[in-house]
Amino acid sequence: MSDKTVQITDSATNKTATFPIVTGTLGPPAIDIGKLNKETGYFTFDPGFAATAAARSAITFIDGDAGVLLYRGYPIDQLAKQSNFLEVSYLLLNGQLPDKAKFSAFEDEITHHTMMHEALKNFLHGFHHDAHPMAMLCGSIASLSAFYHDTLDMDDPEQRRLAAIRLIAKMPTIAAAAYRYSIGWPIRYPRNNLDYVTRFLHMMFEVPSEPLQLSPIVAKALDLLFILHADHEQNASTSTVRLVGSTGANPYACVAAGIAALWGPAHGGANEAVLKMLAQIGDAKNVGKAVEKAKDKNSGFRLMGFGHRVYKNFDPRATIIRDMCHKLLADLNVNDPLLDVAMALEEVALKDSYFVERKLYPNVDFYSGLIYKALKIPTEMFTVMFAIARTSGWVAHWLEQHLDPETRIGRPRQIYTGSVKRDYVGFDKR
């Protein structure tokens, strides 16, 4: 809390109310309006909560104007270069980077909990074989509360911690199982002699008849994407996890709600939209026409994967993943017309004055979609991949929320625009 205050004067009554300023370690200050209604009789109106801070959090900081993303104070480029996803997950959950002993213990515990209950196979088989993998993932994660109902005392710190471990450990297993069920393949058990990301790739693609051979850069590229997607402050899905968590709901229900929010095309479906756009363009020779069409506000055509709501200058994650994307495509020697379209589009957008002046640079969704496609991950699995990565951020926020004495059940207000009071009229008089 700051010593500074803000005064608000009601022009109709000339009454003045004073409100304290709340500051964090980084970022702009906020006005504490908790007593606004009591002092003035008014509520605030903020569609989309774009100007509202709903919580104090020490996990992630974003400066959209400067293109800064910090996890627990560490710049994303340093973590991307020197760390790995599981270490970043530990950081998000615990607030500090682990020493070797702590990381080894954390990795062992995650590995110990990778198996999913055999009954979950029957649960998956209850879905139609061509159901969307996100539907299967959302339902399966929610069902975990039925399998671990004896460890759902949310007042017990150890049970909360164990739930977080289980979610990070089991999410890849359940995601891969949903994918394999959707294509009629037998579900693969996790190979616990492999690292987190490589284990997931084996569960996705290995078949009983032959071992899976992976280029080292494949696992590195996916691990990097997982790091970049691990958390992103109070986005829609994280806010959903915290809102549901504020009711005291169990962590599996909270994360299932986060998955449902992530499924929306305006949130986690952005990289899938990039691939659909590339398919619509069709050929690299059509890129010039597509760019001109995108400049025409009346055309209705948008270039997906460019610019970002939060980052007004550039997306720092895109800068990191761009180099990896190019390395991966070169290493795999992928021959795909859509990737040719993407590379041509990237080249034009980075040079065209229209995009440069408006800072409409390719964002992380542009490159992540290309990497997933190069790895032969089907388009309907793109958002599932996002969910695997974001789970560490979701559970970190859920854990943090339980330690915050200011946490109250979320209850936004509204501006009512319906009918005023009216009396019921029977059928004979209508």
Image: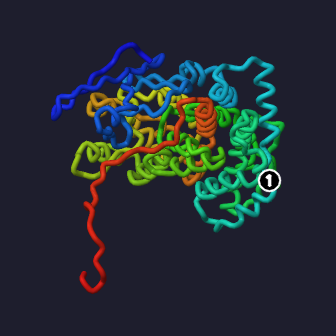
Q: Residue at x 59, y 58 (%)?
A: 135
Q: Percent position (x, y) of residue 268?
A: 50, 45
Q: Percent position (x, y) of residue 324?
A: 56, 30
Q: Residue at x 75, y 51 (%)?
A: 149
Kindly give the residue lying farthest to the bottom in the view shown.
Answer: 428
Q: Residue at x 56, y 54 (%)?
A: 380
Q: Residue at x 28, y 26 (%)?
A: 17
Q: Residue 135: in sight, yes or no?
A: yes
Q: Relative to residue 65, is residue 139 depicted above or below?
A: below
Determine which quarter of the picture holds residue 103: top right
Q: Percent position (x, y) of residue 365?
A: 48, 40
Q: How many marks?
A: 1
Determine which quarter of the picture holds residue 29: top left
Q: How is the image coloured?
A: rainbow
Dot 1 lies on which element?
Answer: loop
Comparing 380 with 171, the one in front is 171
Q: Relative to residue 367, is residue 3 depicted above or below?
A: above
Q: Relative to residue 422, is residue 414 depicted above or below?
A: above
Q: Percent position (x, y) of residue 161?
A: 72, 34
Determine which quarter of the picture holds residue 304: top left
For mark 1, what is the residue?
Answer: 117
Comparing 417 with 192, the one in front is 417
Compared across the picture, whether 167 is left or right of 306 comes to right
Three-letter residue code for mark 1: His
Q: Residues within 10 Å of mark 1 (few under 14, many from 20)?
A: few
Q: Quadrant of the C terminus?
A: bottom left
